[in-house]
Image (tube, helix red, strand yellow):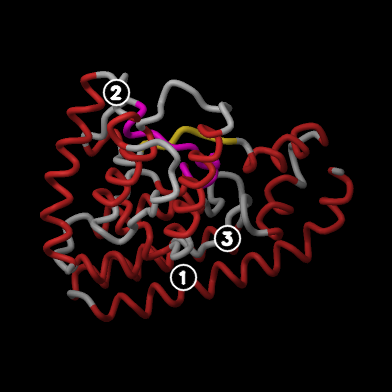
């Protein structure tokens, strides 16, 4: 497999560089919309990044993740959050080996064994536990704040608020609703036991974290609310009550 990737390397590298340049140019053009100081910092950062892409030498290699971290530092104190979000959304389009063929070929055609390449191809499909409200934003480490997502999705979201992340990934509401349906089906088939209350808490937790954007329909759930919470831990019951109170205020704002 490594030999196949090495044959594709040159062509893939050319396409990858062009796509990276195009995105950097768009970010550079966007910088004209903000204050002069920030625009200058972004422009200089873009020039340095282009040099890294062109050089592609040890110690000077362009790294997507490093670029986004550097951009974060520049935009950290920018008062125009809409501008910062727009720039971040553009930077997120930079090719990555997880989702872009050319980036994958360039990265794994050198220094990786065929077994490592195969393992990497399988990695995105492996499930991961996601904090609905990120831990760094006071999200609790309990089942009421957990849902299963792909490792790729989890790593991509980082600590962004869900309402903000949805703007970049508009398929999230439908995927989340389908997740809830799958959970209810698993409970009904006894494939998931001991957490009959979870669909009710999930509905309110997602509504809260998405700021009312995602309203999961669980009207087809076969267990009524009182029965579902009958044996629920006191902590879960308190979390649910607190969410109901908070979500009343969110519903009033969105209506």
**Does residue 4 lie above or below 21 as drawn?**
above
Residue 103 position, x and y percent, is 66, 56
Residue at 70% across, 68% down: 14
Q: Is residue 148 magenta?
A: yes
**Would you identify the image quadrant in which residue 88 lies?**
bottom left
Q: Is residue 52 magenta?
A: no
Of discs 1 and 2, which sits in the foreground? 2
Give the number of the disc on residue 230: 2
Query: Disc 1 versus disc 3: distance between alpha carbons?
Result: 12 Å
Quadrant for the N terminus, please. Answer: top right
Residue at 29% across, 27% down: 229
Of residue 113 and residue 221, the one placed in the foreground of this image is 221
Q: Earlier in the sequence, mark 1 or mark 3?
A: 1
Query: Disc 2 versus disc 3: distance between alpha carbons?
Result: 49 Å
Of discs 1 and 3, which sits in the foreground? 3
**Does residue 63 lie above or below 213 as drawn?**
above
Q: Which residues are magenta?
A: 143-154
Characterize the local packing of mark 3: few (<14), some (14-19) or many (20 or more) Cα atoms within 10 angstroms: some
Residue at 39% across, 54% down: 217
Residue 21 position, x and y percent, is 54, 71
**Would you identify the image quadrant in which residue 227 lies?**
top left
Tell me if 156 is positioned left or right of 234 in this view. Answer: right
Of residue 179 and residue 37, the one placed in the foreground of this image is 179
Give the number of the disc on residue 24: 1
Whether tag 1 and tag 3 are in contact, CB under 8 A, the answer is no
- The residue at which mark 3 appears reads as 95
Tell me if 10 is positioned left or right of 145 in this view. Answer: right
Q: Give the tally of numbered discs.
A: 3
Residue at 59% across, 70% down: 19
Quadrant for the C terminus, please. Answer: bottom left
Residue 206 position, x and y percent, is 32, 48
């Amino acid at each position: 497999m490594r030999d196949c990737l090495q044959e594709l390397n040159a062509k893939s590298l050319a396409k990858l560089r062009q796509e990276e340049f195009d995105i950097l140019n768009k970010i550079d053009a966007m910088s004209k919309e903000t204050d002069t100081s920030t625009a200058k910092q972004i422009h200089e950062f873009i020039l340095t990044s282009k040099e890294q892409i062109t050089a592609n030498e040890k110690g000077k290699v362009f790294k997507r993740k490093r670029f986004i971290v550097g951009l974060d530092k520049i935009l950290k104190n920018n008062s125009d959050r809409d501008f910062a979000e727009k720039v971040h959304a553009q930077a997120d389009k930079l090719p990555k080996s997880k989702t872009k063929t050319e980036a994958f070929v360039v990265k794994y055609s050198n220094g990786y064994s065929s077994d490592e390449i195969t393992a990497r191809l399988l990695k995105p499909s492996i499930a991961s536990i996601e904090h609905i409200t990120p831990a760094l934003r006071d999200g609790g480490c309990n089942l009421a704040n957990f849902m299963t997502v792909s490792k790729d999705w989890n790593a991509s979201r980082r600590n962004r608020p869900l309402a903000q992340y949805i703007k970049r990934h508009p398929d999230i509401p439908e995927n989340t609703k389908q997740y809830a349906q799958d959970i209810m089906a698993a409970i009904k088939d006894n494939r998931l036991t001991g957490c009959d209350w979870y669909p009710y808490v999930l509905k309110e937790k997602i509504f809260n974290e998405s700021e009312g954007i995602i309203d999961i329909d669980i009207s087809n759930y076969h267990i009524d609310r009182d029965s579902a919470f009958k044996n629920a831990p006191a902590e879960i019951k308190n979390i649910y009550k607190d969410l109901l109170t908070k979500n009343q205020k969110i519903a009033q704002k969105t209506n």
